[in-house]
Amino acid sequence: MIRVEDLSFRYSSGAFRLRVPQLSLTEGERLAIVGPSGSGKTTLLNLIAGILTPETGCIEVAGTNVSGLPNAARRRFRASHIGFVFQDFALLDYLTARQNILYPYRITPALKLDSAARGRAEALAEASGIGDKLDRHPEALSQGEQQRVAICRALVTQPKLILSDEATGNLDPESKGRILDLLFEQAATAGTTVLAVTHDHELLPRFERVIDFAQYREVAEV
Ligand code: ADP
Ligand code: MG
């Protein structure tokens, strides 16, 4: 599902350099990434999602060389294949929770907003404990509730790959468990691959594999 080879990346500003010699995930696999703050975990997720492009190396998702696609095609590919839970949620404040969850359907013509999709949005919201808050705007939701909206948005399209960046960071222990149940339930039924960055060490036993990202850190010598 994911194949990364000889990846190297640097931001145009700053000395940070990320190198990942090899990383692969099979379909349906659940991999957790841990590692110190600033070690490049978010950067890697952004590279896999095609939000950033590598300097050198290859990133393949579901058989497609993501970094080789032109910008518009890369955005389309991301919207239809990848569910991304951003570390900062990235909710739109002028949309309600329901509209935020269904946002992928607004921006991706290939995705049909039908009653099944609306039903999934309701069911996901219900299962994650925000079923009664769907008509609120983000400003009227707590951090944990906003985070759940972001997670529902990542799941609603039933993507083949879910990238999750500290998705349980703002939740209490019980909600963390419930959110992970949701994620993994979907993964099991749809064969979804899950790549999750997490600081929650108590959640690690629920993943099949854990990678410590400290090994990939390499700050360019100036
Ligand atoms: P993590 O998610 O592991 O905390 P990040 O991937 O967010 O780490 O960041 C890795 C490094 O890249 C950090 O040193 C950070 O300051 C730097 N960095 C992140 N985003 C940018 C950016 N847009 N421009 C320049 N440097 C950045
Ligand atoms: Mg991060």
Image (cartoon, rainbow, N blue to C red):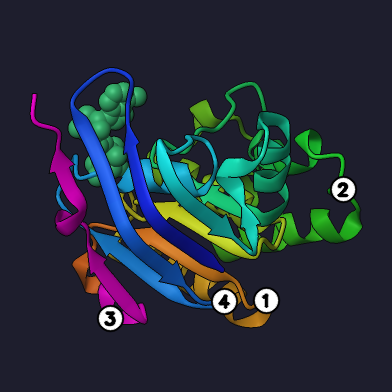
* Rendering coords of residue 109 (x, y %): 86, 39
Location of mark 2 (residue) = 113
Front one among 140 and 149: 149
* Rendering coords of residue 10 (x, y %): 31, 31
Q: Name the residue located 64 percent from the left edge and 46 percent from the top edge.
A: 78
Q: Is residue 132 left or right of residue 214?
A: right
How far is disc 3 from disc 4 in space, using C-alphas? Answer: 19 Å
What kind of element bears circle 4? loop
Residue 86 visible in rendering: no
Q: Is residue 211 left or right of residue 149?
A: left
Q: Earlier in the sequence, mark 1 or mark 3?
A: 1
Which mark is in front, 3 or 4?
Answer: 4
Rendered image: mark on residue 27: 4
Residue stretch rendered in magenta on the structure: 203-222
* Rendering coords of residue 40 (x, y %): 26, 43
Q: Earlier in the sequence, mark 2 or mark 4?
A: 4
The kind of residue tagged 1 is Ala
Location of mark 3 (residue) = 205
How far is disc 2 from disc 4 in space, using C-alphas? Answer: 26 Å
